Amino acid sequence: MKFKVLIAAILITFALPAAADRVVLQRAYEVAASELRLPRATGGTLAFRECRSCDYRVLRVAPGVSFTVNGRAVQLDKFRALLSQLEDADSKAVTVLHHLERDQVISVSVSL
């Protein structure tokens, strides 16, 4: 019985460092569509603020960034057009996915 407990303790000891190696690679921001400034081109920068009193945050856009509307990928110009046609942009949330290691926006999505 002591041998089984000893083996279990050793195995748990080896498993602990693996659990400590988890690193956050991405952060998602949910911002109002009215507080989002889209890039002019896919290689530009994107700006947003999380609240009206917050400062704008400016992030580079990754070359392969995906713009998604209702789960379907669209081009940047179509995404921009759809957001500009919103009647109440304050009530529509846009999700911006930021890759922390590369410090780039990798995805922008909205559900209309």
Image: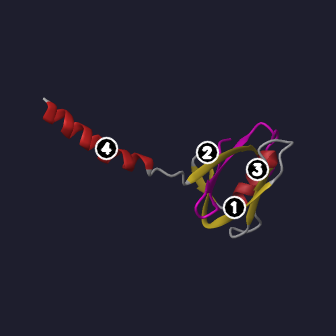
Q: Position of residue 102 (x, y in %)?
A: 60, 64
Count neighbours of disc 4 (C-alpha within 10 A) and say few if under 14, some if 14 to 19, many if 20 or more: few
- Residue 47 horizontal side relative to residue 30, left or right: right
Query: Does the magenta segment cover residue 94?
Result: yes
Which residue bears the numbered disc 3? 83
Tell me the distance, in whole angstroms, between the alpha carbons under discs 4 and 1: 49 Å
Count neighbours of disc 1 (C-alpha within 10 A) and say few if under 14, some if 14 to 19, many if 20 or more: some
Identify the residue at image location x=68%, y=41%: 112
Identify the residue at image location x=71%, y=41%: 93
In the picture as drawn, the residue positioned furthest to the right comes out as 53
Tell me the distance, in whole angstroms, between the alpha carbons under discs 1 and 2: 14 Å
Magenta stretch: give its range: 84-112
User: Can you tell which of label 4 and label 2 is closer to the viewer?
Assistant: 4
Q: Position of residue 89 (x, y in %)?
A: 80, 42
Camera-side residue of 106 and 92:
106
Q: How is the image coloured?
A: secondary structure
Camera-side residue of 85 and 54:
54
Which residue bears the numbered disc 2? 70
Is residue 67 in view?
A: no
Count neighbours of disc 3 (C-alpha within 10 A) and say few if under 14, some if 14 to 19, many if 20 or more: many
For the residues labelled 4 and 3, say whether their Cβ atoms are less than 8 Å apart.
no
Q: Identify which amino acid the numbered label 1 is placed on.
A: Leu
Q: Identify which amino acid the numbered label 2 is placed on.
A: Asn
Which residue bears the numbered disc 1? 76
Q: In the rendered structure, which disc, 1 or 3, sits on the residue that comes first in sequence?
A: 1
Which of the labelled discs sits on residue 13, or is there none? 4
Tell me the distance, in whole angstroms, between the alpha carbons under discs 4 and 3: 52 Å
